[in-house]
Each structure stands twice: as C-alpha cells, then as structure tokens.
Amino acid sequence: MLYNNWFHPGRCGISTSIPAYGDSGRSQTKTVRIIESSSRPEFNLRKTDRAALKTLKKNRKLTILPADKGNPTVVLNTLDYKHRTSSLQEDPIYGILAKDPTDAIE
C-alpha cells in the first residue's frame, strides 16, 4: 500500500509514500504520532542573541549567508556582495554553455 501525498503539513516532513509492509501502516502511523507529540528543541542561542540576529536579518544593507565550508554564518555588506558576484559573472573563465552537459557526464 502506497500513500499518495509525499509530505503532510505538521508531520515534520515524514514521507507518507513509504510502503507499509504487513502491518497496514501501523508502525508508520505510530512513528508519525511520536514525532508530532514531541516538543520543539530548545534554542541554542540566548534570547539577546536571537534578538540581535533578527535585527541583522531586517537590515537590508547586510546579506547573511552560510559559509562555503563548515557551519559558520557570514555577514556581508550587500553592496560588496553584489559587486563580488557581478565581478565573478564578468570573469572570462565563466561563459554560457551551448547545451546542457549533464547527459555527457552521466
């Protein structure tokens, strides 16, 4: 038996299209109930830190991004960020491809 919908709101992204083998979906339903009844995890930031982050996110002059490597967060001046990205696009090493190379790679 396969269920139709992939994600159900409020089910924490649990796939409901997983086949239920022999138990008519009882174990899946039980798992969903356990996750739905669980409490939210505690914040790993203090209240003042969350307020500061919220203020930073509202500032249109700043761009907040995840770093390329690791788990840090990077805060950049938006004008500098746009300048850097546009300079990368103008670099002659990058160009428009004639066709999608995905088929050749696979």
Image (cartoon, helix red, strand yellow):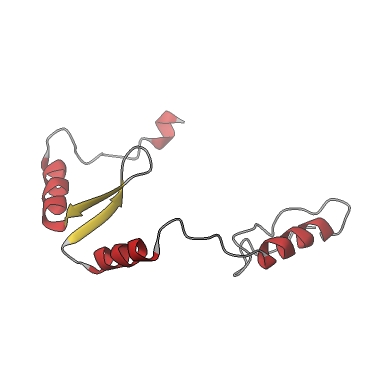
Furthest toward the right, the residue is 22
Furthest toward the top, the residue is 105
Q: In which quadrant of the rendered image does the N terminus lie?
A: bottom right
Q: At 29% from the left edge and 52% from the top edge, which residue is drawn?
A: 65
**What percent of the width, then of the height, locates residue 74?**
26, 48
Q: At 16% from the left edge and 32% from the top edge, which residue is drawn?
A: 93
Q: Is residue 4 above or below residue 86?
A: below
Number of marks? 0
Q: Nearer the viewer, residue 18 or 76?
A: 76
Q: Is residue 42 above or below residue 81?
A: below
| Left or right, 60 with reference to 32 | left
| Left or right, 45 with reference to 9 | left
| Left or right, 75 with reference to 39 | left
**What percent of the width, then of the height, locates residue 33?**
73, 65
Q: At 69% from the left edge and 57% from the top edge, which residue is drawn?
A: 17
Q: Quadrant of residue 27?
A: bottom right
**What percent of the width, then of the height, locates residue 80?**
11, 51
Q: Is residue 56 above or below residue 83?
A: below
**What percent of the width, then of the height, locates residue 14?**
64, 58
| Left or right, 27 with reference to 11 | right
Q: Quadrant of residue 101?
A: top left
Q: Nearer the viewer, residue 59 or 53?
A: 53
Q: Quadrant of residue 38?
A: bottom right
